Image: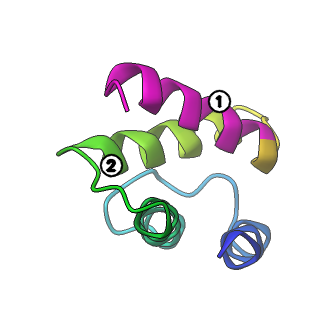
Amino acid sequence: MRKLLAAALVLAPVSVVASDNSLITQFCRTAVKAELQSAGKVPPEGMVEDTCRCFLAEVQNGAGITGAQASCKAKAAEAYAF
């Protein structure tokens, strides 16, 4: 799943607007949900959307994919006591 998200980020311009309809947001949501599902966890309401908004913001501000993923996962875990 991470490879799919990485491919989408490479193919899509970084200046993509972070909207609910953006391709990157859709891939991010799918990846986050799949990762949580494989861990046997159900995300609290708003967690997936907040995590993907964070990811998009960090990448648009120059963070690498791996760094943005790690940072946003940590922020989500803290914010949602997950």
Q: What element carries label 1?
A: helix
Asked whether the residues under the numbered discs 1 and 2 touch, taking CB atoms below 8 Å apart as contact, a structural biologist would say: no
Is 38 situated left or right of 43 in this image? right
68 magenta-colored: yes
Q: Quadrant of the C terminus?
A: top left
Identify the residue at image location x=44%, y=59%.
36
Q: What element carries label 2?
A: helix
| Nearer the observer, 46 or 9 | 46
Which stretch did the figure color magenta?
67-82
Identify the residue at image location x=29%, y=50%.
43
Circle number at residue 62: none
Circle number at residue 49: 2
Crowding around mark 2 (Cα neighbors within 10 Å: few <14, some 14 to 19, many 20+) is some
Give the answer, above or below, for where 79 lies relative to 36: above
N-terminal of the pair, mark 1 or mark 2, is 2
Crowding around mark 1 (Cα neighbors within 10 Å: few <14, some 14 to 19, many 20+) is some
Give the answer, above or below, for where 6 lies relative to 14: below
- Circle 1 residue: 71
Q: Quadrant of residue 76?
A: top left
Q: How far apart are marks 1 and 2 (CA)?
A: 15 Å
| Nearer the observer, 41 or 14 | 41
